[in-house]
Amino acid sequence: MYLELLTDHHTSIYALLKQLSGFSSASMLTANAEDASRAISRLAGLLTVHLAAEDKFLYPSLARSEDEHIRTTAAHFEEEMGHLASTFLTYKEAWMTPTKIRQNPAACLEATKEVLAALQERLGREDAQLYPLLQD
């Protein structure tokens, strides 16, 4: 079912977040700019696929629920995701190439920490609050 697909996406996203968080200093980020760039690119691709799956399957399914709590929760998550998607798009455009990373590794590191924290928090909330609604 699509819940399994979505949780598989989360597993892959968590792995990329862990990889990016491993670049813990500006010098490490500079030295591994190509790897960081590839990880950002993979994360962007996976998030695009993941969001499309949520938009096509998850939210429509939850919006049809007879349970008002489920409908309200889904609507809140869907609305909130637009902001996070926009934030990630700005991050991706700013830092997806090795050249951009090397030009200002300290700023990239700070932006990466912020985006990773937001994504971690969102994934955790989806795992704990949203996805269980599909299992009931």
Image (cartoon, rainbow, N blue to C red):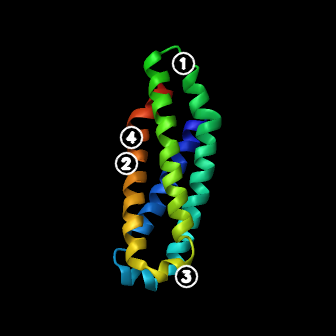
Secondary structure beneath dot 3 equals: helix
Whole-Å distance between the Cαs marked 1 and 4?
Answer: 20 Å
In screen coordinates, is 61 left or right of 29?
Answer: right
Few, some or many residues within 10 Å of mark 4 (<14, 14–19, 20+)? few
Q: Earlier in the sequence, mark 1 or mark 4?
A: 1
Few, some or many residues within 10 Å of mark 1 (<14, 14–19, 20+)? some
Question: In front of the other: label 2 or label 3?
Answer: 3
Whole-Å distance between the Cαs marked 1 and 2?
Answer: 25 Å
Whole-Å distance between the Cαs marked 4 and 3?
Answer: 34 Å
Q: Earlier in the sequence, mark 4 or mark 3?
A: 3
Residue type, mark 2 in image:
Glu
Q: Earlier in the sequence, mark 2 or mark 3?
A: 3
Q: Residue furthest top?
A: 66
Residue 65 is tagged as 1
Tell whether label 3 touches label 2 (CB within 8 Å): no
Residue type, mark 4 in image:
Arg
Whole-Å distance between the Cαs marked 2 and 4?
Answer: 6 Å
Whole-Å distance between the Cαs marked 2 and 3?
Answer: 29 Å
Residue that badge 4 annotates: 125
Residue that badge 2 annotates: 121
Residue 4 lies in quadrant: top right
Residue that badge 3 annotates: 99
Q: Earlier in the sequence, mark 1 or mark 2?
A: 1
Give percent across and percent down for residue 134: 50, 28
Secondary structure beneath dot 2 equals: helix
Tell whether label 4 touches label 2 (CB within 8 Å): yes
Whole-Å distance between the Cαs marked 1 and 3?
Answer: 48 Å
